[in-house]
Amino acid sequence: MEGTDYKVRLEIFEGPLDLLLYLIKKDEVDIQNVSISRITGQYLKYIETFRMLNIDLAAEFIVMAANLMYLKSRTLLPRQEQPPEEDAEEDDPRWELIRQLIEYKKFKDAANFLSLKEIEQEDTFALKSEQPEVDDSPAPLAEVSIFDLIRAFQNVLKRFEESHDLGDIVDDRYTVSDKLEMLLTRFKPGESAPFDTLFADAATKAEVIVTFLAVLELMKMNQFVLRQGELFGRIEIERKDHGAPLPPLDEVLDNIELAG
């Protein structure tokens, strides 16, 4: 990975089908009208970003990447040149993937529905002696998924590359530990800022990367949270003023896992 030997062990509770559904939703297309060529390109870009960041990926992400490339190659072949084992009643090579996505989405929607019902039941009481107060405060911002976060990082990196001459050699001045310390110093508990402002003063691509890795580390430590007000909207980073207490900074830096 460019700029750092830091190894990220990030728990990703979402799988390759979640990523595909995320990409389809972002493009605002119907599952049955998905373009294999487009979604394959977007999916591989995410895999490339995960690898650049040294994020461990489950094997099923790589298997899905191989399957998408195979489906893409099949869509480029004339019908008479399709593999013989595929000469069945289904002529569209996308169909099996589309069926998987539809079934998986049904499962996810049902799980989300049951989860919401469980939350509603927790707030239900048999008797209420007083009229409940109406909460007029703004709805809390939703926490950001790993795919939203990677997408935001991709946008930051793209803008950086467009505005900087990457041919210039600049010494890498920062490590992940340096950036972790700088972020803890910059944000007091409860303070927040737009995610992309964290990279405003970055001088090299490596500095952009290590800053992002420091954000991931602080999220794992339950010290920072990322939120967004609307789907695919601008992301805010906030330092928590509750939750797990922060150990002494020297101890935090000593415990960061560095490869090699």
Image (cartoon, grey):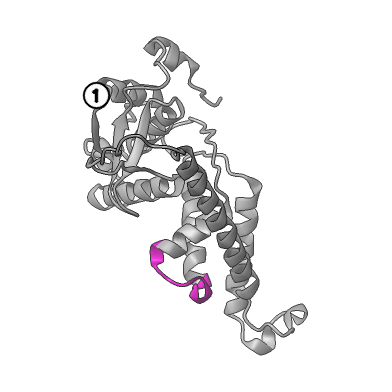
The residue wearing badge 1 is 186
Name the image quarter holding residue 12. Answer: top right
Which residue corresponds to the image point at 40% horizontal and 62% vertical from the top-left?
26
Which residue corresponds to the image point at 27% horizontal and 48% vertical from the top-left?
234
Number of other residues with Cα within 10 Å of mark 1, as a class: few under 14, some 14 to 19, many 20 or more: few
On the image, the x and y values in percent for residue 11 come to 54, 37
172 or 250: nearer the eye?
Answer: 250
- Give the magenta part as a residue range: 26-36
Task: Identify the secondary structure beneath mark 1.
Answer: helix
Work out which quarter of the rendered image holds the C terminus and state it: top right
On the image, the x and y values in percent for residue 32 come to 53, 75
On the image, the x and y values in percent for residue 1 come to 48, 39
* Residue 139 appears in the rendering: yes
- The answer to whether residue 173 is above or below residue 62 is above
On the image, the x and y values in percent for residue 54 come to 51, 38
Total numbered badges shown on the rendered structure: 1
Q: Amino acid at mark 1?
A: Arg
- The answer to whether residue 94 is above or below residue 224 is below
| Magenta region includes residue 32 | yes
Left or right, 147 with reference to 158: right
158 or 59: nearer the eye?
Answer: 59
